[in-house]
Image (cartoon, rainbow, N blue to C red):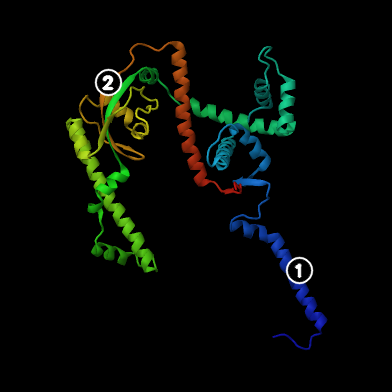
Amino acid sequence: MFNTKLPLQKIFAYFFIGFISFLLIIFFVGTDIISSFGGRSVDPNVVAVVNGQKINRVDYFRYSQRFREQDIQGKEMMILDNLIAEILFYQRAKQMGIEPTEGRVMRFIRGYFKDKNTGTFDEETFKDYLQKTRTSIADFYRNTYKEVVSDEFRRLIQMGFALTQSDIRTEYAFLQSNCQVQYAFIDMEEYRKRVSASVTVTEQELKAAMEKNRERFSDEATNRRVTKEKLEEEKFSATASSLLEKINAMAKKGESFAQAAALLGARTGVTPVFTLGEPVKQGTAGDPVLTQLEKAPNFIDECIFTAPQKTSRVLVTPGGIAVITPLQLQLAAGEPSDSDYNRISDRLSRVIFDSAYNRMIGSLREEAKIVKKLKTD
C-alpha cells in the first residue's frame, strides 16, 4: 500500500522514474520483442533478412533489373525469392570454404567489360555501367566477389556430374524424333463428380470419426466440417488408386488402349506430331489436354515403351488422368556431330545442375531463418 503521508512531489518523482525506465526497456528490448511477433520494427530500407544477412532496397532494385522485361503476376515477390535463393547458395559456398583470389575476381570483371573488337578491358563501358546503376567501385567489387564465389561453387557441383556418351546419344535420338500419340483423358474434377456417390460419407461414419477428433476441435461445427472433408478425400483417393491399379495391370498384361479408355471413361484425341522432350504443341484450339500430357513424369517413357494399339500405364497430370498409345515413333539413327554433341552436353549439364540446385535451395530454405519485409501493394 502507498504511504499517504508521502509528499506529492515524491510520488510524482517515483512515477516519472518508473515511466522513463519503461521507455528505456522498450527502446533497448522492444526491437527483439516486436521482431519476434512479425518483425515490424526492421529497418524500412530492408526488404528481407536471410540468416542474419540483410537485403536492402538498393540491392533488391539492382537485382530486379534482370527481370525488367518480364510482365508476370506476383513479379516482385518472385524476384525477392530468386534473390534469397542466390544468397542462400552464396552462404553455403562460403561455408564450403570457397575463397576466390583477387586476381580471379579482376579477371571476371575484365571479361564482363571486354571490348568485342579489341578483346581488352573497356573502361568507358565500365564507368557508364557504374553511373547508370549508381554503384560505387567498392560495391561493384563486393557484388562481383559474391558472384564469383557462387560461380566457382556452381562449377564444383557440375564437375560431379557424370554424363556418358550413351546419355548424349540417347538425348540426340530424342531431339531428332517424331512422335504422335492417341490419348484418353479425364479431367480430375469430372472424375470427382462421376465417383461422388461412392465417396459419400454416411452419418454413422462421420459420427464415429468425429468422436476421435473431439480433443482437437472444441467447436462441433468445425469438427464436423473438417472430419467430413477428410473422410471424403480418403475415400476419393482410395477409389482413384483402385482405378489406377486396374489400368496399370492392364498395361502389364498388354491389353488394348480401347479397353483402358473404356474403363477410364475418358474422351479420346490425337496429338500433333512432336519431338520427345519438347513441349507438345496445341492441336485443337482451347484443348487443354495436349499441354497436360507432357507434365506427367512418365510421359516420355510411355511414348517409347508402349506397343502400338496397346495401353500405356496411367499418366497422372496436374489436371487429370490419361492413358496413351503411340501412333508413330521415329528415333534418329547415327551419331551426333561435334557441335550437336557439345550443345546437348551443355544442355543436359544445365538441366542436371538446375535439378540439383532446386533441391539444395529447397533444403536450405527449410533450415534458414528468413524474414521477408517487401511490400508489394
- Judge left or right: residue 60 versus residue 222: right
Where residue 358 appears, as percent x and y from the top left, is 48, 36
Query: Does residue 98 appear anywhere in the picture?
Result: no
- Measured in 3D between alpha carbons, the distance from the residue under mark 2 to the one under mark 1, in whole angstroms, is 84 Å
Q: Hey, which residue is sitting farthest front in the picture?
A: 285
Identify the residue at image location x=19%, y=37%: 262
The quadrant of the image that shows the N terminus is: bottom right
Helix, strand or loop status at disc 1: helix
For the residue marked with disc 2, what is the amino acid?
Answer: Gln
Which numbered dot is residue 375? Answer: none
Amino acid type assigned to the residue bearing label 1 in the image: Ile
**x and y percent of residue 159 in the render?**
49, 25
Q: Which of these two is toward me, 335 or 98?
A: 335
Q: Residue at x 24, y 64 (%)?
A: 204
Q: Which residue is mark 1?
A: 20
The residue tagged 2 is 328
Q: Position of residue 116 (x, y in %)?
A: 66, 15
Residue 11 seen anywhere in this rendered image of the structure:
yes
- Residue 309: image quadrant is top left
